[in-house]
Image (tube, grey):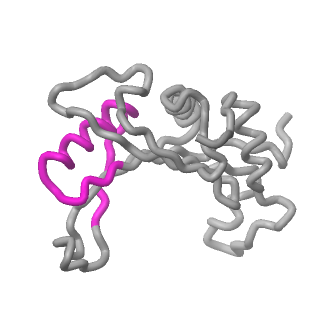
Amino acid sequence: MTNMKDIKVEKVTLNIGTGKPGPELEKALKLLNKITGKKPCETKTKKRIPTWGVRPGLVIGCKVTVRGKEAEALLERLFLATDHKLDPRKLDSTGNLSFGIKEYLDIPGTEYDISIGIIGLDAAVTLTRAGYSIKRRKLKSKSIGKKHRITKEEARAFLEEKFKVKFGEQ
């Protein structure tokens, strides 16, 4: 029996920003597909920044979102890449988590590919509770009550218990 206060992993989003289109972007797309087995989507710029050579609509990165049981399995592999150690500053006030992996070779189950080279990536983890869908529904959407929101401490306890993550200064 599940409780309304039980925390679960809603999604894990992997992101690689290359800064410009070209061979680096193709390598990043190939890498995200290799790690997750899903087709990544390209991310485009919205603003013009002339000093960086960026214009609106330019593809500068890619991302892929994994949900459900696959997200939990992927998250376990990503935590193995960080040796189950994270900085407490990686958690935000609403209990979500974001961290980086310097080399994809650290992730168990991925092998070196000469055509990709060595690339790092970012992972963003969204935690949720039962009843969170009321803020996203189309009709009569409401905000999540203060007592039902996930706090930083609750998220930390959940990650320590479920994934054996240790939080400490790195």
Measured as percent of width and height from the top left, residue 161 is found at 76, 31
Judge by depth and name the residue closer to the eye, 154 or 118.
118
Residue at 40%, 20% (x, y): give it: 109
Instruction: Please tell me whether residue 150 belongs to the stretch shown in magenta.
Output: no
Measured as percent of width and height from the top left, residue 150 is found at 76, 55
Residue at 82%, 59% (x, y): give it: 148
Q: Quadrant of residue 68?
A: top right
- Please give left or right for residue 4 compared with residue 83 in the image: right
- Above or below residue 136? Residue 131 is above
Instruction: Please tell me whether residue 27 belongs to the stretch shown in magenta.
Output: yes
Residue at 66%, 33% (x, y): give it: 165
Measured as percent of width and height from the top left, residue 15 is found at 39, 49
- Above or below residue 72? Residue 52 is below
Q: Quadrant of the N terminus?
A: top right
Residue at 21%, 32% (x, y): give it: 117
| Residues rendered magenta in the picture | 16-44
